[in-house]
Amino acid sequence: MQRTEIFDGVKSILEVALCVAPELITPQTSAEALGADSLDVMDIVVRINRRFSLTLSSQELDTRLRQGGSPGNAPISAENGGAGTRQRKVAELVTVSLLVDLVESELHDPETILHAADA
């Protein structure tokens, strides 16, 4: 699956889940800018799992955020708020590009491909 197809799928999910106009959704747009909070982000992950037949978890999202998420984001650490403010920052740090990256990495992960073949 091409990155543009993944982006279109994620964009469609965001349009429906957050009731936003498609022109507001760009790769750099944060979930917070679209009106999402941390619970909305978890709902979006569930919808992404259904749409792309994946098993992304909140732990994978958390790991990606701790590593810096999308380009330009600083990793979550004790110096910039750490776990104490993570719940507040999730929607701010999660971008459309990060969601597309997660889907793309899962779709191209050999383990994911093996598990899908077993299903």
Image: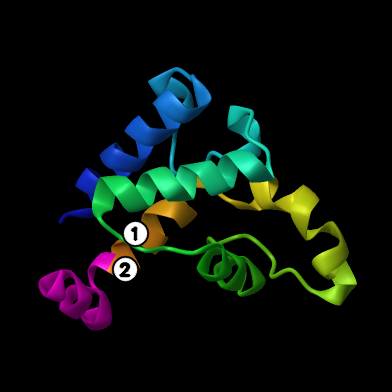
**Quadrant in the rendering for residue 91:** top right
Q: Position of residue 48 (x, y in %)?
A: 37, 48
Placement of 8 over or under 4, stated as above or below: above
Q: Position of residue 15 (x, y in %)?
A: 42, 26
How dense is the environment of label 2, judged by Cα within 10 Å: few (below 14), some, or many (20 and up)? Answer: some
Local secondary structure at mark 1: helix
- Is 4 magenta? The answer is no
**Quadrant in the rendering for residue 54:** bottom left
Q: Which residue is mark 1?
A: 103
Q: Is residue 114 left or right of residue 27?
A: left
Amino acid carrying label 2: it is: Glu
The reply to whether dot 1 and dot 2 touch (C-beta < 8 Å) is yes
Q: Residue at x 25, y 56 (%)?
A: 53
Magenta region: which residues?
107-119
- The reply to whether residue 49 is visible in this rendering is yes
Placement of 107 over or under 19, stated as above or below: below
Q: Residue at x 31, y 48 (%)?
A: 50
Quarter placement of the C terminus? bottom left
Q: Position of residue 23 (x, y in %)?
A: 41, 21
Is the stretch drawn in magenta largely helix, strand or loop? helix
Amino acid carrying label 1: it is: Val
Real-space Cα distance between discs 1 and 2?
A: 5 Å
Placement of 50 over or under 32, stated as above or below: below
Q: Which residue is mark 2?
A: 106
Q: Which mark is residue 67?
A: none
